[in-house]
Image (tube, rainbow, N blue to C red):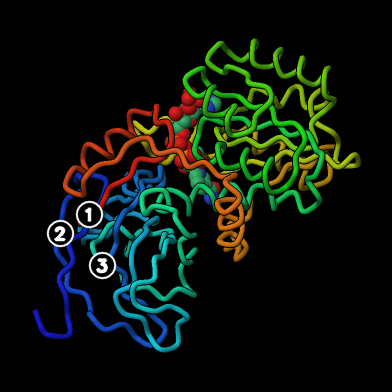
Amino acid sequence: MSDSNLTTNAITFSNWRHPFKLTSFQLASTPLDNQVLVKTQAVSINPVDIIIKSLYPPCIFGSSDKVVGGDFSGTIVKAGSKTSFKPADRVYGSVFNGFGISGSFSQYLLIDPKNAMFFDRIPEEMPFIQAACLPMVGGTALQVLETYKRPLKDTNILILGAGTSVGYYTIQLAKNYYGVKFVASTCSSRSFERVIKAGASKLIDYTKGSTHEVNDILEAVKGHGKFDVVIDIVRDTSLYPYLDKILKTKKEGGMFIEIRALKNMDYKGLGIFSVTPPWRYLWEYYKSLLGFSSFEIAEISDDRDDKFGGVIEKLWGERKLQVAVDSVWEFGEYAQAFERITAGDVKGKVVLTVD
Ligand SMILES: NC(=O)c1ccc[n+]([C@@H]2O[C@H](COP(=O)([O-])OP(=O)(O)OC[C@H]3O[C@@H](n4cnc5c(N)ncnc54)[C@H](OP(=O)(O)O)[C@@H]3O)[C@@H](O)[C@H]2O)c1
């Protein structure tokens, strides 16, 4: 190791054939003017971290080591002169990039804050573990609601998959930031208590089957009127045949918003078909896009939203943000932590602490 380098241990993957492993890298110890050097304190696992590894065929991407992960929290060790940060600042963010080559699951990170998907100071009194949980799923929740592009105050929304982390923050932002009036949501009874605390008014147990789910949603419509927005986080296609009974038309201001989720939310045996959208969704989406549908069907945009840090700071300061942590593992226990996600019944984020 030269004086200008430091050694960092990282969790890496090569391709779908090989398991995650610990690897040591050399990193420049002095950031460029536009960079910061961060000592990582905690990272959280997102489904996409597992999906990306599962989609890396050895024939195309070879067996070079790539650092997994996106979300992190940590402390600035050194800051370049052209950044607005200084040593000892507590920061959190996401360095996720589609190909997962330089992820966050590493003891040290060299980051250009302006190029990161998200990078900001941690709100006062928010612990590192909670901060590491928020960037990807909280940021996606904000993007989902921003996709509506109209005021959400006093609207009725339905969230399919409120037991997911994205759903959990979508409810909280909808109620506590945008002033949504009524939130109905599907989740299993395991998540009822957490989802009610987050702000949902009506819960529908999807595990009882799609007929029960649809009937329960139709009941909610009788009481509260058609939904202004339906948000699908789990690729649930059971509602498409009933859109005219559930969702306001485009003319009435209605929108169906879909996020790029796994089919069946099945983290085991992942392959290319796990991430291809269901035909029923594609049919409705293109009908809407080409003007053959009275409903507006939208995909969330993936643009970086610079509002996110401010929104989190506001809600945390007002004590209107709850962060769900499923479990906390030491860095060396990464294999068990990834297994916890593939088991498919997490209740919040799975976090690794980094020493
Ligand atoms: N930018 C993007 O497009 C973007 C960003 C982030 C995540 N995603 C995707 O969004 C999805 C959710 O991510 P996440 O991290 O929030 O998930 P997660 O926390 O891993 O969600 C797991 C939970 O989903 C619930 N669930 C499973 N099947 C369901 C179903 N059929 N209906 C309703 N709920 C169901 C279960 O909760 P209960 O049974 O307890 O209700 C389960 O515990 C993933 O597919 C992820 O890849 C996309």
Of pointers 1 and 2, the one earlier in the residue sequence: 1
The yes-or-no answer for disc 2 within 8 Å of ligand 1 is no
Disc 2, SS: strand
Q: Which residue is mark 2?
A: 23
The answer for how far apart the CA atoms under marks 2 and 3 are is 13 Å
- Which residue is located at x 86 percent, y 36 percent? 249
Q: Is residue 264 visible?
A: no
Q: Amino acid at mark 1?
A: Ile
Which numbered dot is residue 246?
none
Q: Which quarter shows the N terminus?
A: bottom left
Residue 99 in percent (x, y) is at 38, 59
Proximity of marks 1 and 2: CB atoms separated by less than 8 Å: yes
Left/right of residue 138 with respect to residue 237 in the rendered view:
left
Residue depth check, mark 1 versus mark 3: number of the one nearer the observer: 3
Please, is residue 98 above or below residue 157 in the view?
below
Q: Which residue is mark 3?
A: 108
Nearest to the observer: residue 31 or residue 91: 91
How busy is the neighbourhood of tag 1: few (under 14 within 10 Å), some, or many (20 plus)? many
Please, is residue 104 above or below residue 156 in the view?
below
